[in-house]
Structures are given as C-alpha cells and as structure tokens.
Image (tube, coloured by chain):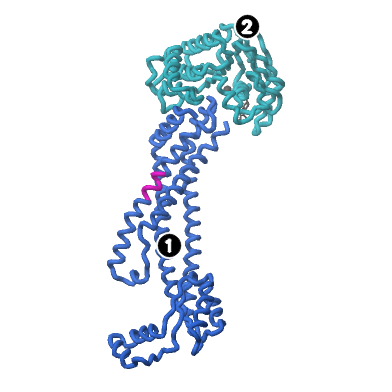
Amino acid sequence: MIVLDHVKMKYPASKTYALNDINIKIEDGEFVFIVGSSGSGKTTLIKLLLKELEPTSGKITVADTDYAKLKRRNIPKLRRKIGTVFQNFRLLKDRTVYENVAFAQRVIETPTRYIRRQVPAMLTLVGLADKYKAYPKQLSGGEQQRVALARALVNKPEILLADEPTGNLDPKNSWEIMRLLEDVNKKGTTVVVVTHNKEIVNMMKKRVITLKKGELISDEQKGGYIDED
Amino acid sequence: MRISSILYSIRQGVKNIKRNLLFSLASVGTIISCLFLFGVFYCVVMNFKSSMDELENSVVISVFFDEGITDENRSLIGEQIRLREEVNTMYYISPEEAWENYAKETYKDNYELAMESFAGDNPLQNSDSYEITLKNLENHAEFVQYLRELHGVRKVVSSEQTADGVSALSSIVTYASIAIIAILLMVSVFLISNTITIGITVRKEEIQIMKLIGATNFFVRAPFIVEGIVIGLVGSMVPVGLVYLMYDKVVDYLVSKQSIVQNLFAFVPAGEIFSVLIPVSIIIGIGLGLIGSLVTTRKHLKV
Ligand SMILES: Nc1ncnc2c1ncn2[C@@H]1O[C@H](COP(=O)(O)OP(=O)(O)O)[C@@H](O)[C@H]1O
Ligand SMILES: [Mg+2]
C-alpha cells in the first residue's frame, strides 16, 4: 500500500511548491496512471516514493514503512521492494543486456545459481532472450526500455514505479511496454505509471490521478486523460 | 557479504581499472611520482643521518686526572661517569697507550726509535685519561662542564667547535626532513584530489543507478575499494623497485670515485634502508589509493 498524507514538496531553489498538499492512497495490486502536463510534479512524486527526496511536510508510507522513521542505512531494503523504470532507461552502457539485469540481483546479493536461472527467464518474459549479449547502444529505444523493465522486475518487487516509460518510444513499442506492465500487475504487483500518452490512458480504463501545477485536481477509477488546454 | 559478492566486487574492481584506463593511469602515475620522490628522499636522509651518527662518535671528550691520583679514586670517577645517561662509549687510556699514540702521531715511521730513547721514562706519565663519546651532541657543553667540576679531574679536552657544528647540522637535517616530508604529502594530496575530480564524472551515473536499485553503500563501494588497493599497490611497487635498482648503483659509483664523499659518508646498506622503505611505501600507496577511491564515491552515495 502507498499512502501520501498531506504531502508538500518545495525545492530549496524554488519559491513555489512542486507538490502541494497531496493525498493519495493506492491499495496493493492496483494499476494507477499519474498524468499531468510537464512541470506538474509527477517526477517529484516518484522521487519521493523512492526516497530520493524528503518531503517538506506530510507523511509518506509505502509497504508499511513510514518514511519519516526510516533510517538511512535501511533505505536499500526499502528500495528492493520497489522496482523502477525511467524515461531515459538508465542502463549501464558498458555492460551487456544480461549483465544489466543480473546487476539488480547482484546488488541484493542473490546467489549466482539463482541469477543464472532468473535473468534468462526475465529476458524471455520481455521478449529479449536472443539479445542477452548485446550492449545497450546496439538496441532500439523500445528494447532498451524492456531491458530496464526486466531489471526492475527481476527481484519480484511489491511495487513497480515507471516514470514516463514510453516517453521516448513509438506507439507500437509503447503498447508493448504497457502490455507487459499490465501482465505484471495481473500477477499481483502494484503498478504506478507516470505518462503523457493520452491514447493509452484513455484505452486502458485504469485509475487516473491528474496533477496540475503541484495540485491533485482529479482522481478517478476507470478514468480518462484530462485535457487542460 | 557472500563469497560470490566478494568475487564479483574484485572482478568489477579490476574491470573498472581497465574501463577507466586513463583515470587509472593518472592515479598510478601520481602515486608513483610521489612515492619515488619519497623513496629517493628517504635514502638521502638515512645516509645523512648515519653520517651524522658517525661524526657524533668522532667527537671525543678526554678526561685527565689530578697528578698522583690513586687507581681507586680514578676508577671511582670512571664509575660515576659511566652512570650518566649521555655516555655512549668510554675507554680508559693508560699512560703507556697515551705515549704510544702520541709517538706514533708525532714521529710517524720513527716512532719505535723515539719510544726506545725514552724507554722506562714515560713523558706522559700523568696523561692517562678516559675517552668518552656521547650518544647525542646536544648536551655536549653541559656534560663537559659537569666533568670539569668532578673532584679529581684536572683537565677536560674536547673539540667544542666540531661538537657545536655537528649538533647544528644534525638539527638542520631533522627540520629539513620534516619540512620536505610535509611538502611532499601536501603535493600528493593535491595531485590525487585533482586526479579524483576526473574520476568522479565517470562514476556518477553508475553509482546513482546502483543506489536506486537498492545497493548498500558498502556494496557500491567494494569494487572501488578493490580498485584503490590495486592502484595503490602498483603505484608503490614501481617506485620502490626503481629506487632499489638505483640505490646500489649510486653507492657503487660514489665509492668507486674515491672522492671525499666516500670519507665523509657512512653509507647505509640497502637491506637496512629497504626493510623500512618497502613496507612504508606500500602502506602509503594503498592508503592514498583507498582514500582516493573512497572520496570519489562518497559524494554520490547520498541518493
Ligand atoms: N531539482 C529541482 N530544483 C528546483 N526545482 C525543481 C527541481 N526539480 C523539479 N523542479 C521543479 O518542480 C516542478 C515539478 O517538476 P517535475 O516533478 O519534474 O515535473 P514533471 O515530472 O511533472 O514534469 C517544476 O516546476 C520544476 O521546475
Ligand atoms: Mg518528469
């Protein structure tokens, strides 16, 4: 479960709130879109959930962990429950597809014999089994994002956060990524997707939370993309 | 940490070195130049020190006794002196030895003749003495004063000027060593931190990704620690090897020259120098490598 309770966020360098009094409750197993125009605070929200940033005020609870009480040294444990996908993929450029995915397991000290089993299984799931030896720059954007998705999922996280995962992809690849996210969600993972993609949001009929200039202006089950202009 | 994680960290550390070859070479080069200077400097200072010790031992204090002093009183004085902390060595020179030494010095090759002509009538009958060397020349003047005030002592002879000169030179060398070592250390730290700034940009993205995936600080750092140790090891072995090869050559050369240097210097054997220089260099090298890699990573760990 993800709970934001009167969360405010103001960057030190900024005069206005990037997020202003946000209240959100996401149950286990939900699939949620977060939409809003550029600068509305979507990435800030994701960073708060990853504990990359501290809120100015308000309370954040994820997977029964109260962020205010979480000690620095326990942050890695929290992050292992959360898989993350970024708009610009953030793969390690000098390592192969296999190593990039295996990397997530090495980080949590998975025994090598499990890594050898789970990484190929994950790559098969995202449809990249035959590209395990390739380097990121030899892959298309869609393929790179699927590697990033495999990396985010290989540790079987409770929650998957995706910040504009299809922002750099064409419609066909975008749909493939969305299908994968939906599959993951069906297997029980809570999925939170930040996106700009109006068509996808309207077609998938999921819960949609809309942000505007740091304010939550709408939160609808089976919602659609709200055009502000 | 699991064994597989440790092995992974070691492999990754070695790969990092290859991947960032330029950065690694710059770091190794920095450490090599610092430790090379350190090694050369250490050799020079050690030889200087040993020559100083030699010089200090060559400053002899002679203590002469009142005329007609009894053997008993004389040895009492000797025991008193021997108890003093400053004393390094102390020998008794009998009148016969004194006369023989004097004759040798004055008549050179004819000294046996001279000795025969004075046979049985030692002109230096009352010139027996204790010859004393001190551990440290700093207290030379006070010690001589102490000897003069002893009951039964007629005269104390010592080359004050030599003593003062050697003592002053010795403290100059000590202060100069401290100053140069301090400068060397500051230069190393400056060079290393410069080299590190290059390395930081290369690692930033990688460290941030690791942290966001849920890596502990230790796991992120382990490969960098391995990298630092390897760089420090290589960076310390090379200069020590170079200085070692050079040392014997330079000493041989100086000795073969038959120059004044040879008479002035008491060369320290290579074994004695390098039994200290090798471990100290390796410790400094690994220390610098470790500090370097830890500082490089620390900045990006707070994600
Ligand atoms: N590091 C930062 N320092 C100051 N202001 C920031 C920083 N990051 C984002 N902002 C500001 O916060 C607001 C929300 O940004 P962001 O969360 O990135 O929006 P989105 O992801 O919805 O485009 C914007 O006005 C942006 O300029
Ligand atoms: Mg954004």
> Residue placed at 46% from the left, 39% from the top?
B199
Q: Which chain is cyan?
A: A
Q: Which chain is blue?
A: B
Three-letter code, disc 2: Lys
Q: Give the camera-side residue of B99 and B220.
A: B99
- Residue tagged 2: A222
Residue A163 visible, this angle? no
Tell me the crowding category of disc 1: few under 14, some 14 to 19, or many 20 or more residues within 10 angstroms, Cα based: some
Tell me the crowding category of disc 2: few under 14, some 14 to 19, or many 20 or more residues within 10 angstroms, Cα based: some
State the residue lying farthest toward the front. Answer: B72
Q: Secondary structure at mark 2?
A: loop
Q: Are marks 2 and 1 on the same chain?
A: no
Cα–Cα gap, marks 2 and 1: 82 Å
Task: Reply yes or no: does residue B236 show up in magenta.
Answer: yes
Residue B298 at what x, y percent from top left? 54, 37
- The answer to which quarter of the image holds residue A124 is top left
Q: Give the camera-side residue of B267 and B153.
A: B153
- Residue tagged 1: B45
Q: Secondary structure at mark 1?
A: helix
